[in-house]
Amino acid sequence: MDLWLQFKQAAGHALGEVLTSGLSVNAQALAYLVSAFLFILALKGLTHPATARRGNLYGMLGMLIAIVATLAGAEVMSYWLIGVAVILGAIIGTVIAKRIQMTDMPQLVAALHSFVGMAAVLVAIGTFLNKRASGDLNALLMGELSAGIVIGAITFTGSVIAFGKLQGLISGKPVKFFGQHLLNALIAIATIALAVQFAQTGAIWALILMTLLAFVLGGTLIIPIGGADMPVVISMLNSYSGWAAAATGFTLHNKLLIIVGALVGFSGAILSFIMCRAMNRSIINVIFGGFGSDDSGGDSAGAVAAQKGVKSASVEDAVYWMEDAGKVIIVPGYGMAVAQAQHSIKDMMELLQARGVEVKFAIHPVAGRMPGHMNVLLAEADIPYDLVLEMDEINPEFQSADVALVVGANDVVNPAAKEDSTSPIYGMPILEAGKARQVYFLKRSMRPGYSGVDNLLFYQDNTSLIFGDAKDSIDGMVSALKGGGH
C-alpha cells in the first residue's frame, strides 16, 4: 500500500508539473509519434471487417493521446474555453451516437466532413487576423492560409450538398446545367487568382472573395453528381477533409495534424480511385462529369421492358424454392438497412444451413450509401466474414445458384448497366444476380433505385418481386422455415 501511495503522489506531482509548466517539447513529440503510429494501425485494422473493431480502438486511443498531449503543451494559455467546447462537443456527440440509425450513417459522415472543412476555414481566418495584428505575416504562412481556406470551403459546401442528397432534402438525381464545366473552370481559376493575390498582399477583399468563391465551387462540383456515385463522393469528401486538416496543421505548426490529415487525404483518395475502378468509372468523370443522367431521346430498354409487366410472389413461394435449394445467394442493399433486416436474415441463414443449403452474401462496392455500409450491417448481425464475398468473387457463382434473394438492392444488380447504352449507369459492373435459376426481390414498391434508373431485372422471366417491408418479409420466411407458416 505504501508503494501504491508513493506512486499516486509521484503521478500527481508529475501531472501538476504538466498542468503548470506544460508538457516538454520532446515529450509532446513522443506522444504525437505514438498517436501517429496508432492512427496507422487504425487504418490497417479498418481494411477488413474482422479487424475493424480493433482498428477503431487504436484510432480512439491515438486521438485521446493526441488531445491530452496537445492540451498539456506549454502553448495552451487558458483551459476554460477549451473545456466548455470539449464538454459541449462530448454531449452533442454522445446524443448523436445514441440516436443515429445505421441507415443515417452516410449523412452523419457527410455532416462531419463539413465540420472539418468549416473548422479549417475558421482556423485559417483566425490565424490571419491574429498574425496580422501582431505583424507576423509572411509569404509562406499566407500561402498555407489560402490553401486551408480554399480546401476547407470546398469541403464544407460539397459535404452539405452530399448531406442534402443523402437525406432526401435535395434530389438524388444529377443537377446538370448548360456550361457547368466552363463555369466550374472559371470559378476555380478566379479562386486560385484571388488566393495568389491574398497570399501576396493580405488584402481583406481578396480573402472574402476567395472564400465565397470556394464555397460556391464546392456546391457546383457536387450537385451535378448523381445518386449512383454517392459512395464515391463520400469517400472523395473524406479525402478533401484530410487535406483541409493537413493545411490547418501547417498553419498551426502542428506536426501530428499534418500527419493525420495526410493519412486521411491519401487513404480517401486511394479508396475513391479503387471504387471508381471497381465501377468502371473515371474518377475525373465522377468529380467533374455529373454522371447519372442522359438527355438522349428514344425509348430506352427500360421503357420497352416496362411494357412486359412484372411478376409478384409471396413469401411462401420464395421459401418453397429456398428450402430445397443447393445454394442461395443473398444480395443486401440499402432497403435492408432501412428495414434493419440483417438480424432476421441471420436467423434465416441458420435455418437454411440446417437444411443443408449453402448460403452466401454478395457485396457490391457501392451497395448502400457509403463504402462498407453492407459489410458493417452484416457484421453487426454476426454473419461470418467468410460468407460475405465481394463482387469479383461471387459473380461466377450466381450461375450455379438456385436462388438469388435481393434484399432492397437496385442499381447494383441492374442489367441496364450492361445492356442499355442510353442508361446513366451503363458501364458500371454489377452483381449478376439474374443468372441464378430464380431471383426474388424484396421491395416496398416499383420505385427505381437511388440513381433513378428503372431496373431491367424486374422484368426477366426468372424474377419475381415480393412487396412489403424487408424485415417483415424475412421474418415471414423464418416463420415458414420453422414450420409455423406465414
Image: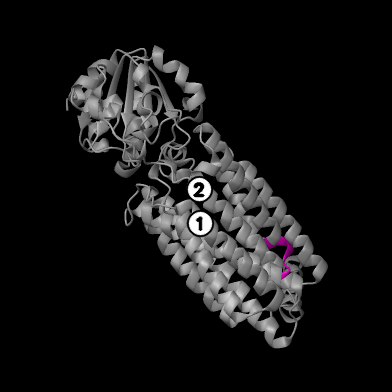
Instruction: Inspect this view and state whether residue 369 appears.
Output: yes
Q: Give coordinates of residue 86: x percent, y percent.
A: 54, 72
Of tags 2 and 1, the one toward the viewer is 1
Q: Give coordinates of residue 101: x percent, y percent.
A: 37, 51
Quick one: SS at disc 2?
A: helix
Quick one: SS at disc 1?
A: helix
The residue to which callout 1 is attached is 184
Instruction: Inspect this view and state whether residue 357 appears.
Output: no
Q: Give coordinates of residue 77: x percent, y percent.
A: 69, 82
Look at 32% across and 25% down and name the residue there: 405
**Looking at the magenta stretch, what is its main secondary structure?**
helix
- Alpha carbon of mark 2 to alpha carbon of mark 1: how far? 9 Å
> Are the two marked residues, 2 and 1, in contact with CB atoms closer than 8 angstroms?
yes
Magenta residues? Answer: 252-257
Sequence-wise, the earlier of marks 2 and 1 is 1
Look at 39% across and 50% down and name the residue there: 176
The residue to which callout 2 is attached is 288
